[in-house]
Amino acid sequence: MRLSGLCTLLEMRGKYLLLLPSSDMRGQKALEVNQSFAFLWRTLEGKEFSPADVAAALQQEYGLDPEDAAREAGQVIALWEKRQLTEE
């Protein structure tokens, strides 16, 4: 799985915005995201990854135990898939 190449992450005044293509093709929509979302996006952008890769990144950055990291990774990936932010 990969993150969508159609999205762009920006940092503006300490806030993170993910620019998404608009469904009506009239530009882009902006989604405000938190720091952990931004960390994962930057870590995984342009790379093939698995749920285990997401969990490992969370463990390394935030010191989560393996079980919590795996659960969080599953939730993040489910959110990305729901918002169509991933590609096969």
Image (cartoon, rainbow, N blue to C red):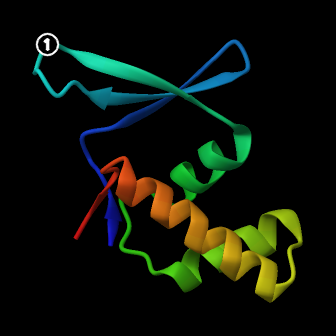
In this rendering, the answer to whether 47 lies above or below 4 is below
Q: Residue at x 43, y 76 (%)?
A: 49
Percent of width and height locating residue 28: 27, 19
Counting from the top left corner in percent of width and height, residue 47 is at 38, 67
Q: Is residue 54 left or right of residue 78?
A: right
**77 left or right of 63?**
left
Task: Name the one closer to the observer, 13 or 29.
Answer: 29
Q: Pick the quarter of the image with the N terminus.
A: bottom left
The residue at the point 89 percent across, 71 percent down is 63
Q: In front here: 26 or 45?
A: 26
Identified at 37% across, 54% down, the residue is: 82
Question: On the rendered image, what quadrant is the C terminus found in?
Answer: bottom left
Element on which disc 1 rests: loop
Displayed quadrant of residue 8: top left
Image quarter of residue 66: bottom right
For mark 1, does the 10 Å Cα neighbourhood hold few (<14), some (14 to 19), or many (20 or more) residues? few
Q: Which residue is mark 1?
A: 26
